[in-house]
Amino acid sequence: MIWYLLTVLLIIPLYLLSLFCLSPKDKKDLLEEIKWELKYLWLGFQAVIDDLFKIWKNKTDLPRRKGDVVVMTGGLRGIGLEVIRMLLECDMIVVVGCRDIEKGEHFANKMRMEGTTLGKLDFKTLDVSSMESVRNFAAAVKKDYPKIHVLINNAAVMYVPYAITSEGYETQFATNYLGHFLLTHLLLKQLDATGTEDAPARVVHISSVAHELGGINFDDINFEKEYYIAYKAYSQSKLAQLLFGLYLNEILKERKSNVRSYVVHPGIVNTELFNNTIVKKTSPFILGLWFKPPDKGAVPIVFCAISPQAKHLDGCYVSNCLKKETPVTKNSKDLQQKLFNFSTDLLKIEEFGKS
Ligand SMILES: NC(=O)c1ccc[n+]([C@@H]2O[C@H](COP(=O)([O-])OP(=O)(O)OC[C@H]3O[C@@H](n4cnc5c(N)ncnc54)[C@H](OP(=O)(O)O)[C@@H]3O)[C@@H](O)[C@H]2O)c1
Ligand SMILES: *[C@@H]1O[C@H](CO)[C@@H](O)[C@H](O)[C@H]1NC(C)=O
Ligand SMILES: *[C@@H]1O[C@H](CO)[C@@H](O)[C@H](O)[C@H]1NC(C)=O
Ligand SMILES: CC(=O)N[C@H]1CO[C@H](CO)[C@@H](O)[C@@H]1O
């Protein structure tokens, strides 16, 4: 804790020093960046404390679901890897969309050697930041699996340097949100055909507390005009996921569909997602000391994906396996609809879920 504060105190003078050697515009941009850095440090601090008090709520049952199919994006490290392990314990078929299939096979062998014998793993190529790759992945999944019980939108990048994908989207927006929006659209029919009234199929979106700092930059979604602050773009992408997750559940209920949508904050978890943060660069041991280990981060995700006890949490934002209210969950109907319309327009989707 002391170290955390010391790190923050160290960073500030460093920033102030660099302020002296900049032009007025650069100064303004840097000040804005510092503001975001501090906002994140404060939010992260609060979230770590929240986890410390509530981690005992980390329960999930692991019901036998022999042969049921889960599709998940990203999962060869961090939280996703632990989610896979738990789903295999339930004897499920886990279809993982990842960029490096060989790495997948390697992990599969390792997991088998470590004693996970149940279930089945299937790796398929997916770069979720590319809409073309998402379409190919969805087609390959549908071909092999007419039934899909759960979709987990897990893959993400955080605080990456500014880059625009070949299709013209800012990387964090494309990876964390838009690719998953499209994937959900493309697999919804399968999910719908699989779910029943008693046991609806589930879509689980992994959002983050970071959504609390975000806004949706509709006029400049890719930060082409505005100065790019990686923190701001990450918040935007995680807010977008939350808004979509909440709205999707409303549409599904309206359509009397047998699919339900959940949004999860896994906690502040020690993974490589933090590679680009100042805390990890300056004092990595803080992560090991204070952050949740990945297997604990996986619990609320698995809970929302398969636990009968989570049934009533559809359409909620879930943290430490509990429903959590934030300003966004309380009051964002218009924003949800605006983003939904914006996204379907962007991707030229005529009717969501009908493909
Ligand atoms: N860690 C936390 O404290 C925290 C807090 C709140 C929310 N979350 C959320 O939890 C989820 C899991 O994060 P994590 O902490 O486990 O992160 P992580 O260890 O960095 O794992 C991210 C995963 O996403 C995959 N991925 C990234 N870009 C991809 C792309 N373009 N196409 C396909 N896969 C891609 C990575 O695969 P590669 O091996 O191919 O890179 C990796 O498997 C994320 O949605 C994150 O936003 C985490
Ligand atoms: C994160 O950092 C570790 C240690 O420096 C490195 O081994 C790993 O490849 C990095 N991962 C990512 C995704 O940048
Ligand atoms: C979104 O689109 C629907 C249908 O086209 C329309 O009725 C609604 O007013 C739009 N909402 C917003 C906030 O743009
Ligand atoms: C499912 C799971 O991981 N449960 C763990 C929750 O935390 C308690 C206390 O740390 C552990 O004993 C449980 O195994």
Image: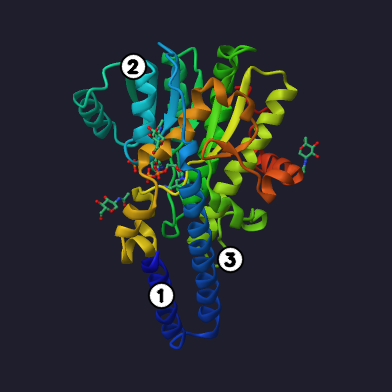
Secondary structure under badge 3?
A: loop
- What residue lies at 38% left-to-right and 71% top-to-bottom? 7
- Whether tag 1 and tag 2 are in contact, CB under 8 A, the answer is no
- What residue lies at 44% left-to-right and 52% top-to-bottom? 158
**Neighbours of disc 2 within 10 Å: few (<14), some (14-19), many (20+):** many
Disc 1 CB within 8 Å of nearest ligand 1 atom: no
Q: CA distance from mark 1 to mark 3?
A: 25 Å
Q: Position of residue 179 (x, y in %)?
A: 51, 38
Disc with the residue nearer the chain's start (1 vs 2): 1
Secondary structure under badge 1?
A: helix
**Neighbours of disc 3 within 10 Å: few (<14), some (14-19), many (20+):** few
Q: Position of residue 29 (x, y in %)?
A: 53, 74
Hey, what amino acid is under mark 2?
A: Gly
Disc with the residue nearer the chain's start (2 vs 3): 2
Q: Which residue is mark 2?
A: 119
Disc with the residue nearer the chain's start (1 vs 3): 1
Residue 308 seen in this snapshot: yes
Relative to 348, 231 lies left or right: left
Q: Which residue is mark 1?
A: 11
- Whether tag 1 and tag 3 are in contact, CB under 8 A, the answer is no
Hey, what amino acid is under mark 1?
A: Ile
Mark 2 or 3: in front is 2
Q: How many marks are shown on the rendered structure?
A: 3
